Image (cartoon, grey):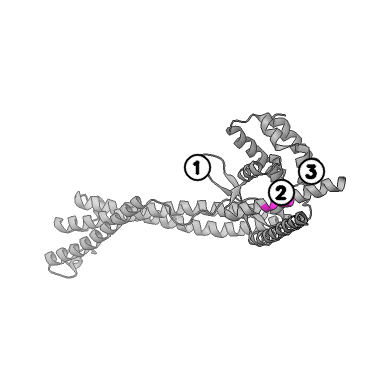
Amino acid sequence: MNKKEFMDILKNSLLESGINDIEDILNEYEEHFIFKMADGFSEEEVSLKLGDPKELAKQFVQEEPKKQPKKKNRFFTAIGLVFLDILIACIFLSLVVGVIAIAAIAVSAAAAGVLLIAKMNIASLIPVMPYKSAVVFAVGFLSLAILMFITAVYGFMWFKQLISSYARFHKNCMAKASNEAVYPAKASFLQINGKLKRALRGTILVSLVIFIIAFISGYAISAFDAKSFEFWHVWEWFQ
Amino acid sequence: MEVYIILNIQYKKGVIELCIFSLLYKADRYGYDISEYLSRHIDISDGTVYPILRKLKSEGLVTTYLSEESGGPPRKYYKLTKTGIDSYLKDRQEWLDFVDTVHELIKEAENE
């Protein structure tokens, strides 16, 4: 008897006996064939060692009560999941908006830094100040851009992980309700290797420090130049 | 004769269940692994293990979970539940006592 013949007889005998979840049983035997044949056995040898498929099918007959409660269980689980999905979708949506906002801050900070250094004053958006103040502020803006960029990337990766973790949870809930085997849960926190993690954290720390120093010293230099703590009045920024 | 055969099959099944429990008590295993291990030690056809595993699962003594192996389809692992562990420890002791008693009886009969 070859594999196909064995599986066909098994399937028909199982169907005749009115057994649930035939797929699950067939998969197990299918896998057995794959493993055995990988060890060099022929289809005929494997099916011979497995035994008579009709006899095997008979041995699966025994567990009939508890057909009804399972269906109900599945139904309620499905409804519960729909509501949970809606709630989670809202949370995910706000997370996406947050990540986009951070990315937007990164882009505009980078633009501001570049414009200040290049002395480009498009539409007079950039207020008047001595070039040395502009350079110091530009450094601050650029490090802010790096900081926000990494944060956005971090946020995006974490968001992806969350979605895949939730998808796995969703799948497992349904599998559990139908009494099928489940996959291991996926982590909901970020999975990046130690080296990359250290590099990212180092960059964040350095850019944060440069950002703070640049803005404090930018303020100090400007205040000294304008001889006023409120140098923006001296340079008439808001008039 | 008929009764004897049925009893024999039931008896064998019980022993096989005990062997499966003892295997799973040590570590979780996938179906093929269990079937291979048993057929290496006990004279049964390879296919018999799967109906037993399914029965144990429907009785809540074992559960299954899928594990993703690198390079290959996910494998279905069997794992003892809390009830499964309790049931194994009880059956194990019963079996050992039973074997001891039989052993004693045989020895006694031989000495007479």
Could you classify mark 2 by the number of other residues whose Cα lies within 10 Å: few (under 14), some (14-19), or many (20 or more)? some
Out of A96 and A170, give the one closest to the viewer: A170
Out of A51 and A11, give the one closest to the viewer: A51
Whichever of labels 1 and 2 marks the residue nearer the N terminus, that label is: 2
Secondary structure at badge 3 equals: helix
Q: Viewer-nearest of labels 1 and 2?
A: 2
Task: List x then y, in percent, for residue B96.
Answer: 68, 58
From the viewer's perspective, is A119 left or right of B11?
left
From the viewer's perspective, is A227 left or right of A188?
left
Span colored in magenta: B13-18
Q: Label 2 is placed on what type of residue?
A: Ile
> Which mark is on residue A58?
3
Task: List x then y, in percent, for residue A72.
Answer: 73, 57
Chain under callout 3: A
Tell me if residue A155 comes above or below residue A230 in the rendering.
above
Could you classify mark 1 by the number of other residues whose Cα lies within 10 Å: few (under 14), some (14-19), or many (20 or more)? few
> Which mark is on residue B52?
2
